[in-house]
Amino acid sequence: MSWEDLKLVPNPEKKEAEDIDIIITKVFSTRDGAKVLSYLKQITIDQPTWYPGEDASHGYAREGQNSIVRDIFKRIERTRNR
């Protein structure tokens, strides 16, 4: 057996992720979508995740919110770099 004998197996999960990337890019590329994405960034990523004296769990929850917005940006970037 050689490397040439190996066949690529289609990965439906990859195709689904690419489709979601494209849809997200389309939605947030409109003028209104860009406004919404900017707003989401302002209320999440651009804000502190934790303040001294707060319970640490507040920071964990805030980072969870941030990760959703970061995922949107990552998917847009991936689509534009294809």
Image: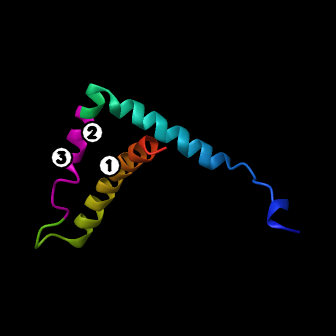
| Residue named by callout 2 | 37
| Residue named by callout 1 | 69
Q: Is residue 19 above or below residue 41?
A: above
- Please rate how many residues cluster around mark 3, counting C-alpha atoms within 10 Å: few if below 14, some from 14 to 19, many from 20: few
Taking the spot 24% from the left edge, 66% from the top edge, the residue there is 59
Looking at the rendered structure, the kind of residue marked 2 is Leu
Taking the spot 35% from the left edge, 47% from the top edge, the residue there is 73
| Residue named by callout 3 | 42
- Per the rendered image, the range of residues in magenta is 35-49
Looking at the rendered structure, the kind of residue marked 1 is Val
Q: Is residue 7 above or below residue 76?
A: below
Q: Find out whether the residues at labels 3 and 2 contact each other: C-beta distance under 8 Å.
A: no
Where residue 10 appears, as percent x and y from the top left, is: 72, 48
Dot 1 falls on a residue whose secondary structure is helix
**Quarter of the figure with residue 26:** top left
- Please rate how many residues cluster around mark 1, counting C-alpha atoms within 10 Å: few if below 14, some from 14 to 19, many from 20: some
Mark 2 or mark 1: name the one nearer the start of the chain.
2
Mark 3 or mark 2: name the one nearer the start of the chain.
2
